[in-house]
Amino acid sequence: MKTRLVVLAVLAGSVVLAAPAPGVGSAQPATQCKPEAGFPAATTPIAFWSTEARCAIVPAGPGGVFGAENFGNKFPGEAAVYMGIVHVAIYDAVVAIRGGYRPYAPTPAAPAGTSSAAAVAAAAYATLAGLQPALGADQTILDHDYATYLAGIPDGRAKANGIAVGERAAAAVLALRADDGRGCSTTVTDLGQPPAGPGVWQPGPGPVLGLCLPGMRPLALASASQLRPHGPRPLTSRKYADDFNQVKELGRIDSTSRTPEETLEARFWTDHDIRQWNDGMLRLAAARGLSLVQTARMLAMAHVAGGDAMIACFDAKYHYWSWRPFQAIAQADADGNPRTLADPGWQPLTTTPNFPEYPSAHACHSMAVVAALEAFFGTHDIAFTLDSRATNTTRDYARLDDIVADVDLARVLVGFHFMSSDLQGTSLGRKVGRYVDHHYFQPLHCRRHPHRSGDG
């Protein structure tokens, strides 16, 4: 895989103003989400509201590292699920107008001449507002952006019908997601945390993340445990020792074996991957010239697959409770494996997320999105660009599968995961993505295998 690293051109003071969104008028909303500042939000209704959803779900991060325009509070595991919910509502609103595909939730067909821009805006806004008690975003920002966006659409029957269609789509999706496990009060004790011992992950300081996900109702899968992997490698095995020694050498903060390029790769993927993937998919939709319904379907497939992959992944994490490399390396004298040696002073390249190790959530999510995109386009030979605000670089890929290989290695290089955990996460994500492709977002004339991106 050949990767080109480029310093991001979109920096404060050097942004390129985007063209107005069709149907929105010449003045862009003065939103904290800043679609006027060169993001892919100001080009189409779906791109605008997909970005608005991202900004309302993803946090700004420490020092604004994930993007100062973001005003959400969800870490990637939960953010993926929330993005899935919003994007199925957008998809259903578009399908109600354009037809051609089965809706996610029953949605009546729209009258002729209905405004797509109004429908997409209403579907996204109403869904985000309905998620708001758990979302925790600033409602004032969301309300302002919605009102300003609608003000740019000419009043009349088309606009009124669009708002009604979008609100119906949102209501149907929110009804399906009622009492789905979001905003739970689950503790590690509730999830059956085992006693401390070799192989068992122990929480670190600060909040433990992802506790709601094992009990959350999936968007597509029958249950969170439906595709649960078999479990991590035995501590006494040679393969575990190989994984152990690999991350011990490459993932330590002061590694002399990790190259500068590999250090950059490791840090690249410490950005909020939901923002990375969503922005990348919007760029892909624009580059491919996807229609309204194609864009809505692609995003819905990818975000539903990504959300369910996170639910399935955290079900496995809190089923196996596998320790992180920094714990395993410090306590190797107790693992019963003569091929591993303890290093109590070992530290990863950056701070390890506070939840169990197996399987890798980043690998689960990335592969699920890739599998959905491969299904949508009918090939893995898709050029794709991702950026990272953690490194202010971009990475260009010629094939979608190359992205997953990059992620798998990066999680070892950063010291977060054993390679086998990354590979198991990749396997789980692939199964989830294929399941979504076979069971949802299908054309009306095909029961099992949807046409690819040629349908508009």
Image (spheres, rainbow, N blue to C red):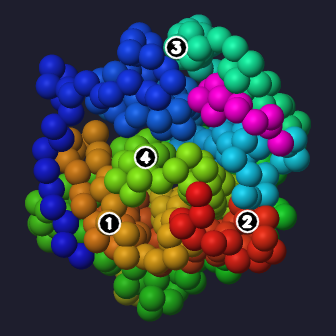
Residue assigned mark 4: 282
**With respect to residue 340, does 109 lie above or below?**
above
**With respect to residue 370, does 141 lie above or below?**
above
Horizontal placement of 29 versus 221: left or right?
A: left
Mark closest to the chain's N terminus, 4 or 2: 4
Q: CA distance from mark 4 to mark 1?
A: 13 Å
Q: CA distance from mark 4 to mark 2?
A: 22 Å
Q: Is residue 191 visible?
A: no
The amino acid type, in three-letter code, at marker 4 is Leu
Which residue is pictured at 47% across the width and 29% down the height? Answer: 22
Mark closest to the chain's N terminus, 3 or 4: 3
The amino acid type, in three-letter code, at marker 3 is Gly
- Give how far across and how far down residue 103 sits, in percent: 79, 52
**In this view of the protein, which residue sits in the foreground, 248 or 96?**
96
For the magenta stretch, what is the residue range?
109-121
Mark closest to the chain's N terminus, 1 or 2: 1
Residue assigned mark 3: 152
Q: CA distance from mark 1 to mark 2?
A: 25 Å
Horizontal placement of 191 versus 407: left or right?
A: right
Residue assigned mark 1: 383
Question: Which callout, 4 or 2, points to the residue nearer the camera?
Answer: 2
Mark closest to the chain's N terminus, 3 or 2: 3
Quarter occupied by the N terminus: bottom left
Question: Which callout, 1 or 2, points to the residue nearer the camera?
Answer: 2
